[in-house]
Image: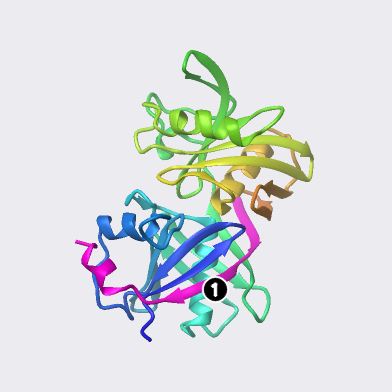
């Protein structure tokens, strides 16, 4: 049987890998939406399209369930790294990947490639680099009006944009109720990922996540990096933080302006798309 797709999850955040070196069909927006649909397709939080081999570079394209393209995904990068090991593209423990959000360094921490560390790069709080509309400014502990309510938010980019809202108690209901409104707020021209942040102590935080283009999500690597970075910038946590999410935990280390993420990856399935399904792509 031919293999058209590979499905993995990282703490319940599931992605489907489609390898352009293996498949004989073209990916497009309609195909992405259909594959990610949990009723009419396979079902996933996104598509990882690669490896795209350009000389010595390994490029990865990341697509959201709505067909839009993401700059970076922490969980997606870990999952894709596991696939590269499984498919024997990579035979070393350290390598780098190129995403729209920049180059990332990856370290495989065990022989099974189930525990992976990623250098997610640098964080910026500068508004025009996130981007946030208006005059250039630091987006730290600033006010955002949502439905007539003033929220204290910190916004940043770690290769993709994030808005973090520290509150006393996080909940799924809060993320679902306000997530889309913040994601699509006119102040964010490219939309934004949203995290509701609860500080448990100086080494532990809890977050609920609304992902741009995907909606409510059980776990997110880049969201974990963003929330930990915001909490550190606000002086609420130390430089090593465990991030607790409904799907599980990720460890974040902050070294200067760089952020490192360590988390698990699990394989789920692999398979072939039926001819009927492929016809629906176009």
- Residue drawn at point x = 67 percent, y = 37 percent: 231
> Is residue 252 left or right of 38 when viewed as pictured?
right
- Residue drawn at point x = 65 percent, y = 47 percent: 246
Residue 256 on the magenta span: no
**Which picture quadrant has residue 32?**
bottom left
Work out which quarter of the rendered image holds the N terminus and state it.
bottom left
Q: Which residues are magenta?
A: 258-282
Residue 261 on the magenta span: yes
Q: Which residue is mark 1?
A: 82
Q: Residue furthest left?
A: 282
Percent position of residue 253, x then y: 69, 54
Work out which quarter of the rendered image holds the C terminus and state it.
bottom left
Percent position of residue 92, x then y: 57, 83
Q: Is residue 254 above or below residue 153?
A: below
Q: Is residue 129 above or below residue 148?
A: below
Q: Is residue 241 above or below residue 129?
A: below
**Which picture quadrant has residue 98?**
bottom left
> SS of the residue at dot 1?
helix
């Amino acid at each position: 049987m031919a293999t058209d797709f590979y499905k993995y999850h990282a703490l319940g955040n599931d992605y489907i890998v489609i390898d352009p070196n293996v498949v004989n069909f073209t990916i497009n927006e309609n195909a992405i939406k259909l594959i990610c649909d949990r009723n009419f397709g396979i079902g996933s939080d996104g598509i990882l399209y690669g490896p795209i081999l350009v000389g010595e570079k390994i490029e990865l394209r990341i697509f959201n369930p709505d067909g839009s393209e993401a700059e970076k995904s922490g969980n997606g990068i870990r999952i894709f790294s596991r696939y590269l090991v499984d498919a024997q593209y990579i035979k070393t423990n350290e390598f780098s990947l190129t995403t729209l959000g920049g180059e990332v360094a990856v370290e495989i921490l065990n022989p099974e490639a189930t525990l992976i560390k990623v250098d997610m790069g640098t964080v910026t709080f500068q508004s025009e680099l996130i981007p946030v509309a208006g005059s250039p400014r630091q987006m730290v502990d600033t006010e955002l009006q949502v439905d007539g309510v003033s929220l204290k938010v910190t916004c940043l980019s770690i290769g993709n944009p994030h808005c973090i809202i520290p509150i006393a108690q996080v909940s799924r209901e809060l993320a679902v109720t306000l997530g889309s409104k913040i994601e699509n707020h006119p102040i964010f021209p490219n939309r934004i990922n949203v995290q509701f942040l609860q500080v448990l102590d100086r080494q532990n935080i809890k977050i609920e996540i609304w992902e741009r283009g995907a909606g409510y999500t059980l776990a997110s690597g880049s969201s974990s990096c963003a929330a930990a970075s915001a909490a550190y910038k606000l002086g609420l946590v130390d430089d090593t933080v465990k991030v607790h999410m409904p799907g599980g935990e990720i460890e974040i280390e902050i070294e200067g302006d760089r952020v490192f993420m360590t988390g698990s990856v699990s394989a789920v399935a692999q398979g072939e798309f039926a001819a009927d399904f492929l016809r629906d792509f176009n």
